[in-house]
Image (tube, rainbow, N blue to C red):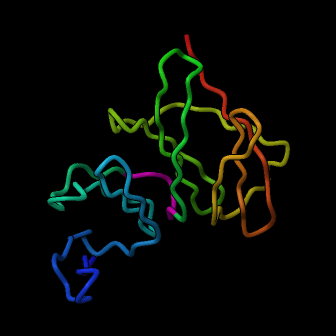
Amino acid sequence: MHVLNAETLQTEVQIETAGHGLFSCLVHNDLAWIGCYDGNLFVFDANTFERKKSIKLHQGIYDIMVFEDSRAGPKEEFLVFGQHFGHVDMIQTTTMKQVITTITSKNLKINTIFNLFRTSREYEICFCCYNGMYFAKVNRNLT
């Protein structure tokens, strides 16, 4: 991946993703989260471009969104990853660990998730998919 200078459009840094094709990117809390076609997720420091972590998710990562949850007390931030074949993973931003989460939807035929966004309803996410738009509620086991 080439990081370009915004003024000159010249390559400033080349980041190595081990040949994995890039599908999505989100810069959050000074980290660049890079999602790839085969489910590989790379986390880089957004200032130094040093690789911090790599994580293998289920399938191609098409979209990444921030999800805030305060049901367990203080606000926690998670990243939600919409993937090929309808897979969804969540990672807590402070620990960079995957979270076991149940995302329920009335329709179980969700296909490739191209876009995710939070709705105005509490703890609900909208999935814009290859085969339609779906709504799901995020439930966490807080025990």
- 5 vs 41, left or right, is left
Quarter-wise, where is residue 68 in the image? top right
> Which quadrant would the N terminus be assigned to in this image?
bottom left
The residue positioned 79% from the left and 67% from the top of the image is 131
Residue drawn where x is 28% and y is 75% of the image: 19
Magenta extent:
56-61
Question: Percent position (x, y) of residue 39?
Answer: 44, 60
Residue extending farthest top: 143
Residue 81 sits above or below residue 15 on the image: above
Percent across and percent down for residue 119 are: 73, 46
Figure label count: 0
| Of 132 and 40, the residue lying toward us | 132
Q: Residue at x 26, y 88 (%)?
A: 9
- Going by the picture, which residue comes out furthest to the front? 7
Placement of the C terminus among the 4 image quadrants: top right
Magenta span: helix, strand or loop, mainly?
loop
